[in-house]
Image (cartoon, coloured by chain):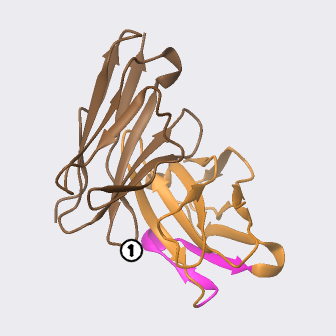
Chain colours: A brown, B orange
Amino acid sequence: EAGVVQSPRYKIIEKKQPVAFWCNPISGHNTLYWYLQNLGQGPELLIRYENEEAVDDSQLPKDRFSAERLKGVDSTLKIQPAELGDSAVYLCASSSPVGTQYFGPGTRLTVL
Amino acid sequence: AQSVTQLGSHVSVSEGALVLLRCNYSSSVPPYLFWYVQYPNQGLQLLLKYTSAATLVKGINGFEAEFKKSETSFHLTKPSAHMSDAAEYFCAVSEPGGYNKLIFGAGTRLAVHP
């Protein structure tokens, strides 16, 4: 069974540029999560989707971050414009509605 | 609000020695508890979870953890460390039935030396 797929794995951009991350969850998992992991810290939830509906986006900085999951499968997380402090690893996870979360390998973003 | 404290950001053990990684939680109700492991440049992998059944939970790779309500702890142990156990370990908590809302600790980096 394929795991959670994320791309790109690494991204380097200059500040004020836009960036997007893509996630493909495990087949059949209706719940999808985006997490932010700063260096030396544990992951922090940014947004959770149940199918195509964002049911918890309270921690998403909506002035510059946006996410979508139009067909309830793949998801995209966007930052526009990026700031130096956005340098981090962005993790995607998926689960069945009350199941264990399975994580992708993450996208490491460096903002110069 | 729930929170997780992992004592010791770095732990170093010899190969074959006991591994003990500490986790304490703060929750108003007995929570669900999880240990995840993260190898370099990889995502998090579930080691084990406590969901109010047996207090001693066995996981993958020889790890186990014991839920102690009186101490609000969920420490991770392994009797004999292997070089391949070197990684970052994260403890996480959620509300009962709330698999969807995980609060992670800051992590403990385990080093295993020959």
Type of amino acid under label 1? Gly
Image position of A76 (left or right of B108) = left
Q: Residue at x 75, y 52 (%)?
A: B7
User: As drawn, is A91 to the left or to the right of B70?
Assistant: left
Quadrant of image for the N terminus of chain B: bottom right
Task: State the image coordinates of residue A81 (x, y, percent, origin top left).
Answer: 39, 17
Residue A110 place in picture, x, y as percent: 40, 20
Q: Which of the 4 quarters of the picture holds residue A26?
A: bottom left
The chain letter under disc 1 is: A
Which region is colored magenta?
B54-68
Q: Is residue A106 above or below residue B54?
A: above
Q: Is B9 positioned to the left or the right of A81 in the image?
A: right
Q: Is residue B44 above or below residue B80?
A: above
Q: Quadrant of residue A94?
A: bottom left
Asked whether A23 falls inside the magenta stretch, the response is no
Q: Evaluate whether residue B22 shows in this view.
A: no
The percent position of residue B11, horizontal first and vertical second, equals 67, 48
Compared with residue B66, is residue B17 higher up or lower down, i.e. above or below? above
Instruction: Identify residue for label 1.
Output: A99
Q: Is residue B49 above or below residue B14?
A: below
